[in-house]
Image (spheres, rainbow, N blue to C red):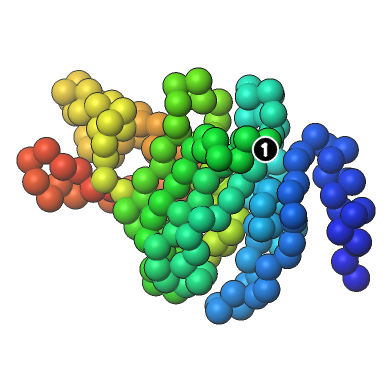
């Protein structure tokens, strides 16, 4: 029997976590529940390990920001295929978006492709929001086992620096913030392709 929602919220608030309109979603098309609440970062159906990681990231972000960001799903892929977009918002000024993630979900919810994670406003940099929004997305779509992205901006710059130092493509990618984020969640197998002279595409998997 599930605890009453009010009891769950009170327990979560005692940990310093903000929840707004937290509801358990119905089962997905591939048989696993949707793990993230409608708004908030509670994932009572996710693995204990992932839940602990998300709570830890949320606490660190809250300390750095001075408030706890709210998770919101803007575009849903129906849990199996399609475009998704999620974002972290200010808990009071809800039009203030702190970070957002967009990607294409495919292979019955197992692949996340063309991933783009953006942290908006320099004041929000280096506060763990990139890891937090990615972890929350994994909780919402728990079957993800492969991620693909094109290197850009800081990731591309650091990657090219590694190449210039004589590192292999794989070792150079391990220096990037993207790899450190994905490896934190167990995505450590790397495949890199170079579709053109200046573009590098990376796939990481478990």
Q: Find residue 176 and report its image quarter.
A: top left
Along the horizontal axis of the image, is 27 left or right of 137?
right
Picture layout, residue 7 above or below residue 198 = below
Picture layout, residue 3 above or below residue 137 = below
Q: Find residue 107 and report its image quarter.
A: bottom left
Along the horizontal axis of the image, is 122 left or right of 42?
left
For the point 74% across and 62% down, the residue is 23
For the point 35% across and 29% down, the residue is 175
Quarter of the picture holding the N terminus: bottom right
As rendered, which of 72 and 52 lies closer to the eye?
72
Numbered disc 1: secondary structure: loop
Could you say where residue 171 lies in the image, as x and y percent from the top left?
Answer: 30, 34
Quarter of the picture holding the C terminus: bottom left
Could you say where residue 169 lies in the image, as x and y percent from the top left?
Answer: 23, 38
For disc 1, the neighbor class at 10 Å (few under 14, some 14 to 19, many from 20) is some
Picture layout, residue 41 above or below residue 98 = below
Q: Find residue 94 and report its image quarter.
A: top right
For the point 51% across and 55% down, the residue is 74
Picture layout, residue 101 above or below residue 164 = below
Along the horizontal axis of the image, is 101 left or right of 22?
left
Disc 1: which residue: 91
Could you say where residue 61 lies in the image, as x and y percent from the top left?
Answer: 63, 30
Along the horizontal axis of the image, is 39 left or right of 83?
right
Could you say where residue 78 lies in the image, as x and y percent from the top left?
Answer: 50, 71
Task: Tell me, yes or no, if residue 91 can be seen here.
Answer: yes
Task: Tell me, yes or no, if residue 145 can be seen here.
Answer: no
């Amino acid at each position: 029997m599930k605890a009453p929602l009010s009891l769950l919220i009170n327990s979560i608030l005692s940990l310093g976590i903000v929840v707004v309109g937290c509801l358990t979603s119905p089962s997905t098309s591939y048989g696993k529940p949707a793990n993230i609440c409608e708004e908030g970062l509670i994932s009572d159906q996710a693995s204990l390990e992932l839940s602990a990681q998300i709570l830890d990231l949320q606490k660190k972000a809250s300390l750095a920001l001075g408030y706890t960001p709210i998770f919101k799903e803007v575009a849903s892929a129906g849990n199996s295929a399609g475009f998704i977009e999620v974002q972290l918002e200010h808990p009071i000024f809800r039009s203030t978006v702190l970070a957002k993630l967009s990607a294409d979900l495919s292979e019955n919810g197992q692949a996340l492709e063309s991933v783009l994670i953006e942290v908006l406003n320099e004041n929000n940099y280096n506060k763990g929001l990139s890891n937090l929004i990615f972890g929350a997305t994994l909780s919402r779509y728990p079957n993800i086992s492969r991620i693909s992205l094109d290197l850009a901006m800081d990731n591309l710059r650091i990657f090219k620096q590694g190449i210039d130092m004589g590192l292999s493509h794989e070792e150079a990618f391990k220096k990037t913030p993207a790899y450190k984020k994905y490896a934190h969640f167990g995505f450590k197998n790397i495949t890199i392709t170079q579709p053109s002279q200046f573009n590098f595409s990376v796939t990481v998997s478990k």
